[in-house]
Image (cartoon, grey):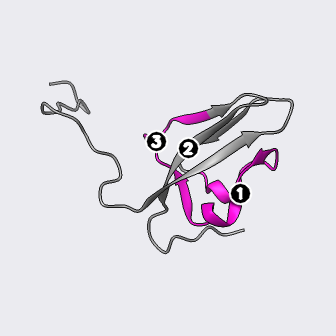
Amino acid sequence: MIPGELILGDGEIEINPNRETRELWVTNTGDRPIQVGSHYHFADVNPALELDRQAAQGFRLDIPAGTAARFEPGDARSVRLVTLAGTRGAQR
């Protein structure tokens, strides 16, 4: 075994188990690509992303840690969000 190495068992790994999720429609109305990281409070993303920000309050992307979603100009698609941990708040 190499120090720090992880040996995983067989099967799938479920991320964010037992957490509330929701689907939102997102459109990039800007002229440049926009990337959003896995732990960024989704209600506070770039203003060029058109979405229901009230519904996104207290949520982040439901994707593996350390990854990001990229929205090309004109992209319109559904994303799945998951609740933030803790008090579900994001300081501004």
The residue labelled by disc 1 is 44
Q: Residues within 10 Å of mark 1 (few under 14, many from 20)?
A: some
Q: Residue furthest top?
A: 2
Binning the other alpha carbons within 10 Å of mark 3 as few (below 14), some (14 to 19) or many (20 upward) gives: some
Residue pictured at 30% horizontal, 55% vertical: 17
- The mark that comes first in sequence, 3 or 1, is 1
Q: Is residue 60 magenta?
A: yes
Horizontal and vertical percent position of residue 80: 50, 47
- Amino acid type assigned to the residue bearing label 3 in the image: Ile
- Secondary structure at badge 2 equals strand
20 over 10 or under it: above or below: below
Q: Are marks 3 and 1 in contact (CB under 8 Å)?
A: no
Q: Is residue 59 magenta?
A: yes
* Whole-percent x, y for residue 73 in the image: 78, 29
Q: Amino acid at mark 1?
A: Asp
User: Tag 3's secondary structure?
Assistant: loop
Type of amino acid at the residue the image marks with label 2: Val
Q: CA distance from mark 3 to mark 1?
A: 17 Å
**Lower sequence index among marks 2 and 1:** 1
Q: Residue drawn 71% across and 31% down?
A: 75
Q: Nearer the viewer, mark 2 or mark 1?
A: 2
Quadrant housing residue 18: bottom left
**Which region shows up in magenta?**
40-69
Disc 2: which residue? 79
Marks 2 and 3, how far apart at CA: 10 Å
Give residue 92's mark: none
Report the residue marked by disc 3: 63
Q: Secondary structure at mark 1?
A: helix
Position of residue 42 relative to residue 88, above or below, is above
